């Protein structure tokens, strides 16, 4: 197991991942009744905890505190936060259910693919396209959470446009992971 003697598993990067995991049910609870003020609070919470996605990886490398637990928690926290927000956006009618279903399906399929790859002794690292997908999802979700118009800025309309970009990147990156896997294992 990778870790340093100084930090152990309960280090700052892993704590930041746990904060993202804990924020997911809070976001769900708040989005049960997404009023104008609650929508702003949810967007602010989502932005704050999304920043920890970058911060925990940066700190883990800088502090030499990369752990096996952290490698598990970080993508889990990302998926929980994003999927929780997307499902609640569907329930409030702010995004199309079919798009979210395909996006969640992609996440499950790629996670399963990575598990199969690990069993075969192959590590499928996050690709640049996969990282772009995550950034696009976060950027699209923020205006969708805000939803209401402020200062003549139509946040829902902006969010809808950005969501299409995130959707396309999500599907493309999923196809890319499968293509890479099957080209490496074409004899299996």
Image (cartoon, rainbow, N blue to C red):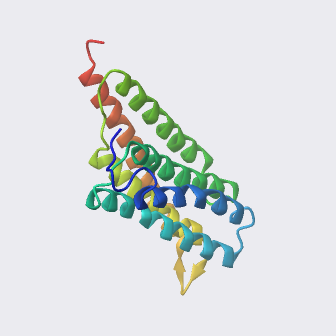
Residue 118 image offset from top left, x and y in percent: 36, 27
* In the depicted structure, whether residue 120 falls above or below residue 108: above
Left or right position of 17 against 35: left
**Residue 11 sits in quarter:** bottom left
Q: Nearer the viewer, residue 101 or 25?
A: 25
Q: Residue furthest right?
A: 33
Which residue is depicted at the point 54% across and 74% down?
44
Q: Is residue 161 visible in this depiction of the protein?
A: no
Q: Nearer the viewer, residue 3 or 53?
A: 3
Quadrant in which the N terminus appears: top left
Residue 175 image offset from top left, x and y in percent: 36, 35
**Residue 36 sits in quarter:** bottom right
Left or right position of 163 against 172: right
Q: Nearer the viewer, residue 17 or 125?
A: 17
Which residue is depicted at the point 29% across and 44% down?
127
Left or right position of 112 against 1: right
Q: Residue furthest front?
A: 5
Residue 84 image offset from top left, x and y in percent: 60, 53
Quadrant in which the C terminus appears: top left
């Amino acid at each position: 197991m990778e870790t340093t003697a100084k930090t152990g598993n309960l280090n700052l990067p892993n704590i930041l991942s746990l904060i993202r995991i804990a924020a997911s049910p809070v976001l769900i609870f708040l989005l049960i009744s997404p009023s104008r003020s609650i929508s702003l609070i949810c967007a602010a919470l989502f932005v704050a905890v999304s920043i920890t996605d970058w911060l925990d990886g940066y700190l883990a490398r800088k502090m030499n505190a990369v752990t096996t637990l952290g490698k598990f928690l970080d993508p889990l926290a990302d998926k929980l936060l994003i999927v929780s927000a997307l499902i609640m956006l569907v329930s409030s009618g702010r995004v199309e259910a079919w798009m979210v279903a395909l996006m969640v399906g992609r996440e499950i399929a790629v996670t399963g693919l990575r598990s199969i790859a690990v069993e075969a002794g192959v590590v499928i690292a996050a690709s640049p396209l996969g990282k772009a997908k995550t950034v696009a999802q976060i950027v699209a979700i923020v205006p969708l959470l805000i939803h209401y118009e402020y200062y003549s800025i139509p946040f829902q309309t902006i969010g809808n446009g950005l969501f299409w970009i995130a959707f396309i990147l999500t599907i493309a990156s999923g196809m890319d992971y499968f293509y890479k896997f099957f080209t490496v294992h074409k004899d299996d």
